[in-house]
Image (cartoon, rainbow, N blue to C red):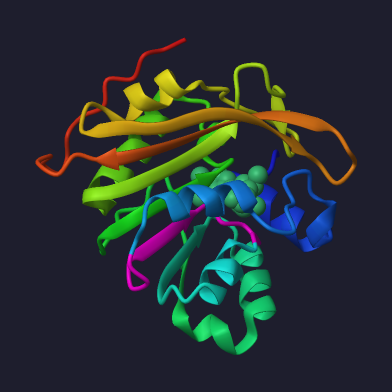
Amino acid sequence: MPDTRQEHWDRIFATKAEDAVSWFQATPETSLRLIHACNLPREACILDVGAGASRLPDALLEEGFTNIAVLDISATALARTRARLGEKAHSVRFITADIVAWRPDFAVDLWHDRAVLHFLTEPQERAAYADALRRAVRAGGFALISGFAPSGPERCSGLPVFRADQDMIASLLGADFELLDAFEEDHHTPSEVRQRFVFTRFQRRANSALGHQSSERTP
Ligand SMILES: C[S@@+](CC[C@H](N)C(=O)[O-])C[C@H]1O[C@@H](n2cnc3c(N)ncnc32)[C@H](O)[C@@H]1O
């Protein structure tokens, strides 16, 4: 029987070294640059969705952010982050959940996703993701979403991916979210393969209501 999604990711994080996975970054520079562009106060709630064992929380803690949450389907990935952070892990909220089924119980000022939405190959999964995002991100808050661009690889971690451009991500989030930045960039994997990513930064309009439906445009 094939792995469930959770088993797949637990196995990856249990068997591969941190810098042996294709998405590894010693410093998540582009994400940090986009986060800085949002000019958030240090107590703002930043949620990293599908955080894996990323070093983003380390960098945010270093910058003085005090309200960081990391969510992942893999408890093994989050255990790695917890171990790496040591004492500092006490000030981070760890959430083991499938983003497709997750119902947020706190408000988020910034939703960060690097290479997670792109694993949701079914439209109904992406609709559930957008629903969770809209429930979580407060009016005036931000959503930073990145993943493989249309010219990027067809698979990641052995799984098929949904490659999207900025318009496809914008139509998934719906009219309540204004697109502030969008660009493509190459990620160089540890084995020196180039992968084309799209990066987007959205802001939720100040007058938007919770729970609006997306109007995803299919490619
Ligand atoms: C390619 S890795 C990226 C990890 C991290 N964002 C980074 O930039 O290093 C994808 C991550 O998404 C997580 N993931 C995949 N599907 C998920 C889902 N449905 N819900 C929550 N996390 C998921 C995986 O466990 C993995 O940690």
Q: Is 27 covered by the magenta stretch?
A: no
Is residue 100 among the parts visible in the rendering?
A: no
Q: Is 42 covered by the magenta stretch?
A: yes
Residue at image point 60% right, 58% down? 74
Give the image location of residue 177, x and y in percent.
26, 34
Give the image location of residue 211, x and y in percent.
17, 40
Magenta part of the chain = 41-54
Q: Does 33 sit left or right of 65 as displayed?
A: right
Residue at image point 72% right, 24% down? 153
Q: Does 14 sit left or right of 172 as displayed?
A: right
Residue at image point 52% right, 75% down? 61
View extreme (bottom): residue: 87
The quadrant where residue 69 appears: bottom left
Q: Nearer the viewer, residue 36 or 10?
A: 36
Is residue 174 among the parts visible in the rendering?
A: yes
Q: Nearer the viewer, residue 108 or 186?
A: 186
Residue at image point 42% right, 20% down? 168
| Total numbered badges shown on the rendered structure | 0
Q: Nearer the viewer, residue 125 or 182?
A: 182
